[in-house]
Image (cartoon, rainbow, N blue to C red):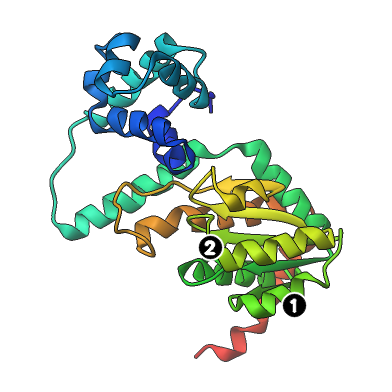
Amino acid sequence: MAENENVLLRLRQSLAGYSPTQQKLGEYVQADPARVLYMTITELARESETSEASVTRLCRALGCKGYTEFKMALALDVQRSQAPREQGDEIDTLVDESVQALRDTARLLDRSVLEQAAAVLHRARSVQIYGVAASAIIGDYLHYKLLRLSKAGQLFSDMHRAAMNATALGPTDVVVAISSSGSTRDLLHVVKLARKSGAQVLVISNTPRSPLASLSDILLVAARPEGPLSAGALNAKVGAMLLVELVISALMSHDPHYGEASQQTASATLPLLL
């Protein structure tokens, strides 16, 4: 994906990590991007009550060389968003939002980072998965997928136990920390302990700029849904589940043993089925 593609998606993902001035400017752009297309940099600075320097900094933070390139990328996003869509009921809306979350996650994905994550997991002596509340559900899914491949791993949703676990790790261990916000205090504490012990940290989050992201060696970002009340909802989690699926798929390509283990573990459950 080109650095300056999907600027509205990148803006939505990163907004919480910006300075108050940048947040104010970003919110203005998000509120009416089609109007911003026809503004000069001076007009945007004046209407958003910020400054031309702030506009320039935002453009660069979004991967654009300047305001002109930003408006060209914004125009593509506006054109895409204005495509006609059929109106449906609440079920259709949830399905559409979930599908969009998957597509947005794919747009955000850096394939080289995905491959790096798979390589680190492959070399790991063990994988320790930390996540609380709804993020623990994603952790459980990852733990299940690793179990299918006979890859040693543990899941911790209790951060007291995770803290004890973190102190016993070393350079050959990998911690996968999962948090939508990247700001869960208990999780940050145990990740700091794990880093102090020498473990590598892979983060799966919806927030590219967060305290947890700053502690990561590898960061995989799932799309953040547009709605403010969607925490824990399907459309807020399917992107992270897609990342788990993609990491496991990339991991399997590192060694034929994973494919063999997957068949063996699947066969082990056959006698349990009616």
Residue to which mark 2 is pinned: 184
Q: Nearer the viewer, residue 208 or 258?
A: 208
Residue to which mark 1 is pinned: 164
- The disc placed on residue 64 is none
* Left or right position of 99 against 162: left
Marks counted in the figure total 2
Measuring 62% from the left and 38% from the top, which residue is drawn there? 111
Measuring 54% from the left and 43% from the top, which residue is drawn there? 209
25 shown above or below 266? above
Question: Mark 2: which secondary structure?
Answer: loop
Q: Earlier in the sequence, mark 2 or mark 1?
A: 1
Q: Tell me which corner region of the image, top left, top right, bottom left or bottom right, holds residue 145.
A: bottom right
Which amino acid, by three-letter code, is at mark 2?
Thr
170 shown above or below 210? below
Residue 186: x and y, percent? 59, 68
Question: Mark 1: which secondary structure?
Answer: helix
